[in-house]
Image (cartoon, rainbow, N blue to C red):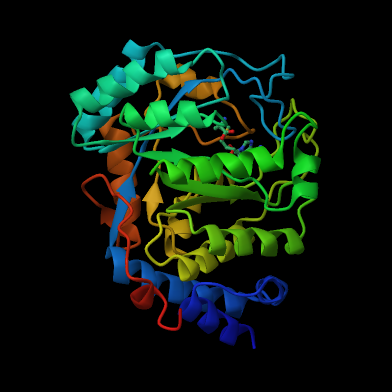
Amino acid sequence: MTKQLLDKLAQQGRLERQEFLSLLQGRTTALQQEAAARAKILREKFFGQGIFLRGLIEFSSYCHNDCYYCGLRRSNTAAQRYRLTPEQILACCRNGHELGFRTFVLQSGDDSYWTDQRLVPLIQAIKRDYPDSAVTLSVGERSFASYQALRQAGADRYLLRHETANPQHYRHLHPAEMSWQGRQQCLRDLRTLGYQVGAGFMVGSPGQTLEHLAEDLLFLSTFRPEMIGIGPFMPQHDTPFAGEPAGSVELTLFLLSLLRLMLPNGLLPATTALGSLHPHGRELGICAGANVVMPNLSPEDARQKYQIYDHKLSVGAESATGLADLQRRLQEINCHIASGRGDFIPVDPAVLHPKH
Ligand code: SAM
């Protein structure tokens, strides 16, 4: 029965909420292996053996939000705060470009210092110096006008995880001043403005049930983001969720496989959180259907301070040695680093899902 649901997901690109739930409740090792095998076939059909690289630049650890799970939350007085200067950020890009990176992901807390007046010239400078490269932003919730200004400055993509598709669960993870509706509106605004949009969620976040995950899958099958980032929840010792258990690697891998069946041409990273929880987490993620890795290009001392959770993998690929290690790991699973920006390529729904 559950295998038939895998077929149906691949053929139609979506399932009913109850069907997603049945898949999650019926997860066995055999089902998980079956889903991963099908996901791998689809990944290879659309992307071959190539894995796209994104160079992550964590450029500010300041945040005015207070998410209960995140080490950057404003109430965390123990967090080490820093901001890279535009010159430092451009130096990260220069280094990354020399190493072959053609996408730069600028990520930060929701930091009010980084106004449009500051971000726009930075984006323009990156696009001027590296016209062959994509700029992805991951700087949180902003107004439509701000997203528009950043898009006009040249930003190509935007990562904003929806965090949870269930408003009550959202309330469990965030203080009352933050709004589920607001975050959903941001995702719609980003899409309207022509960004390639990334949504996503943590697996095993406190209070999350399989019903919630079924809602996440349903939301994603409807919104169909170009990119989806999922990774296990990891506790951070100075947050209200310090004592909560980490999410499951196995469940994350299963969800990655389901997402590949849902979005065969989607860009799915094997996230840092997965790599942090398991020594071969990123390779396992790729074998389950992921096709993107995001090595860290931030300076060493910044990486140490950007502690959104404990035990965060902080080996970088800012050096040729780091990149060679990644290449070797990919070779071991019969993959290689793909060249180019790695944009989302739209495909006719009839080709993606024969019974769409
Ligand atoms: N401020 C931006 C935003 O909120 O979208 C971008 C930075 S935020 C740190 C990036 C992502 O980190 C969040 O969307 C969240 O899912 C993830 N994250 C935060 N704390 C985490 C934790 N304890 N474990 C795993 N992932 C976490």
Q: Quadrant of residue 141?
A: top right
Tell me where residue 58 appears, x and y as whole percent. 46, 26
Q: Nearer the viewer, residue 210 or 224?
A: 224
Q: Indicate whether 350 appears above or below 192.
A: below
Q: Residue shown at 68%/53% (left/top)?
A: 165
- Residue 86 lies left or right of residue 165; in this view the side is left
Q: How many marks?
A: 0
Evaluate whether residue 352 shows in this view.
yes
Q: Nearer the viewer, residue 118 or 335?
A: 118
Q: Residue shown at 60%/14% (left/top)?
A: 80
- Residue 225 lies left or right of residue 104; in this view the side is right
Evaluate whether residue 278 shows in this view.
no
Ligand 1 quadrant? top right
Tell me where residue 333 appears, x and y as whole percent. 35, 62
Q: Quadrant of residue 73?
A: top right
Tell me where residue 145 appears, x and y as whole percent. 48, 27
Q: Residue shown at 72%/47% (left/top)?
A: 205
Q: Residue shown at 54%/28% (left/top)?
A: 143
Q: Indicate whether 123 appears above or below 182.
A: above
Tell me where residue 20 appears, x and y as whole percent. 65, 72
Quarter of the figure with the N terminus: bottom right
